[in-house]
């Protein structure tokens, strides 16, 4: 069972890019430096979420911290909105809150292998928030604290499984490197690529993905300190197959095009400094009760770097759903099936249009059927991002 869940949480939250070697089909990636309290420049990955017929509950992947529908925004407010549909890829770079333990590295002291961090009780995925009462802003700040400790005990405030704990850690002198070490690898940043769902024409604010950026091992939302948004060029498409989800491959264009402001279980949001060209004029918002079984369209970008319109079928609508898996999506368009095999990592956030209204976004692909996946109600995205509406 654990193997199945771990495979599902390979559950690349449908987007192009890589989340630190743990990509949710938007993807995130980056490798820590061996034996050093530092995280290297993140690689790029694709956002997206992979599911299976026996799907993992939404909370296991992305529906953490979802707002209670209509708690902050009324249905009337949502129904009066008109939004520009997305479909274009976007890149994200972000710094996390604190630093996350992603590995352990033993080293020698007096001919014996030691690991002070493991001995002190630190565990994988612990988030180190403070050392000696001072906030840790990144890997370099932690490294400085360790190397300047002069062998004294350090008191770490960590977050583990949603609770804060205190860990007492005494770094050990490594004669071979002439510095104090703790024997951990940490991560403090990430990068990835996803698909824009909508843009608010009056402000340039946007939302995308339709699910949160999560830790691929724990499924928990990643707490971000700050982030930037960049334009992206899609270079190729890896077609999906049974048991092997496909992927949009791309790269960040130079410079930044906006700021990332939030990460929720129903998507990410931010603001463009220079909004990209939308594929159509602004469309009215369709609420959950407007979504019906039958034909619809999605907008997404493949290797032509032009936004395409593709036919899909919606079914199994759960009007009570509050997370990111609200209805089933089946790709029926021959052109999209020929190009990608169906839904691929990187398509998370692709807007869904039905009866002239923007009603939702693609969020997941099924491992055993790449032509099928799930979508989120646009209403769920909006209620998790009230600041955009107000």
Image: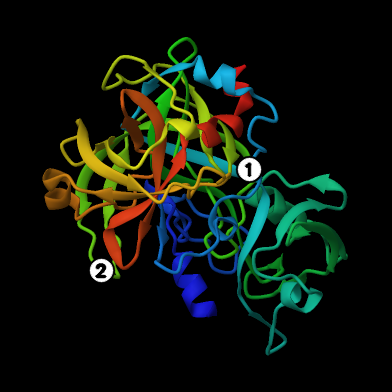
Q: CA distance from mark 1 to mark 2?
A: 31 Å
The quarter of the rendered structure image containing the C terminus is top right
Residue at the limit of the structure toward the top, as seen here:
202
Kindly indicate the quadrant of the structure image that contains residue 389: top right
**Residue under the point 66% across and 45% down:** 65
Coloring scheme used = rainbow
x and y percentages locating residue 38 in the rendered image = 59, 56
- What residue sits right under mark 1 in the picture? 66
Against 61, residue 289 (above or below) is above
* Vertical side of 320 occupied by 72: above or below: above
Q: Earlier in the sequence, mark 1 or mark 2?
A: 1
Residue at 65% in and 69% down: 124
Residue placed under numbered mark 2 in the picture: 242
Q: Left or right of 96: which side holds 156?
A: right
- How many neighbours does mark 1 have within 10 angstroms: few (below 14), some (14-19), or many (20 or more)? many
Nearer to me, 335 or 116 = 335
| Residue 44 drawn at (x, y percent) | 39, 49
Q: Residue at x 38, y 47 (%)?
A: 15
Name the foreground residue: 12 vs 122.
Answer: 12
* Horizontal relation, residue 164 to residue 244: left or right: right
The answer to whether one can see residue 144 in this image is yes
Q: Can see residue 17?
A: no
């Amino acid at each position: 069972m654990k193997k199945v869940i771990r495979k599902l949480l390979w559950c690349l939250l449908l987007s192009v890019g890589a989340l630190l070697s743990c990509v949710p089909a938007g993807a995130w990636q980056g490798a820590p430096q061996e034996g050093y309290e530092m995280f290297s420049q993140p690689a790029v990955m694709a956002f997206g979420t992979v599911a299976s017929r026996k799907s993992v509950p939404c909370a296991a992947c992305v529906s953490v911290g979802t707002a209670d529908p209509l708690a902050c925004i009324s249905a009337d407010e949502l129904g009066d909105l008109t939004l520009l549909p997305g479909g274009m890829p976007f890149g994200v770079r972000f710094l996390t809150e604190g630093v996350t333990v992603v590995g352990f590295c033993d080293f020698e002291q007096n001919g014996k292998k030691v690991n002070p961090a493991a001995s002190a009780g630190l565990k994988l995925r612990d988030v180190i928030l403070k050392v000696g009462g001072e906030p840790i802003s990144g890997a370099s700040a932690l490294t400085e604290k360790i190397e300047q400790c002069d062998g004294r005990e350090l008191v770490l405030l960590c977050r583990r499984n949603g609770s804060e704990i205190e860990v007492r850690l005494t770094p050990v002198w490594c004669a071979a490197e002439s510095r104090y070490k703790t024997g951990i690898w940490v991560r403090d940043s990430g990068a990835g690529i996803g698909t824009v769902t909508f843009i608010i024409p009056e402000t340039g604010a946007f939302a995308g993905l339709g699910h949160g950026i999560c830790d691929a091992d724990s499924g928990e939302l990643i707490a971000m300190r700050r982030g930037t948004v960049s334009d992206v060029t899609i270079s190729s498409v890896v077609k999906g197959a049974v048991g092997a989800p496909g992927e949009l491959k791309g790269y960040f264009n130079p410079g930044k095009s906006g700021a990332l402001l939030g990460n929720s279980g129903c998507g990410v949001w931010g603001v463009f400094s220079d909004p990209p060209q939308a594929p159509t004029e602004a469309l009215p918002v369709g609420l959950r009760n407007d979504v019906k079984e039958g034909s619809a369209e999605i907008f997404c970008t493949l290797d032509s770097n032009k936004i395409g319109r593709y036919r899909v079928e919606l079914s199994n609508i759960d009007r009570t759903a509050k997370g990111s898996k609200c209805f089933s999506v089946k790709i029926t368009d021959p052109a999209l099936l020929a190009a990608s095999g169906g839904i691929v990592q990187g398509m998370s956030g692709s807007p869904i249009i039905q009866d002239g209204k923007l009603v939702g976004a693609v969020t997941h692909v099924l491992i055993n059927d790449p032509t099928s996946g799930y979508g989120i109600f646009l209403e769920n995205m909006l209620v998790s991002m009230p600041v955009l509406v107000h």
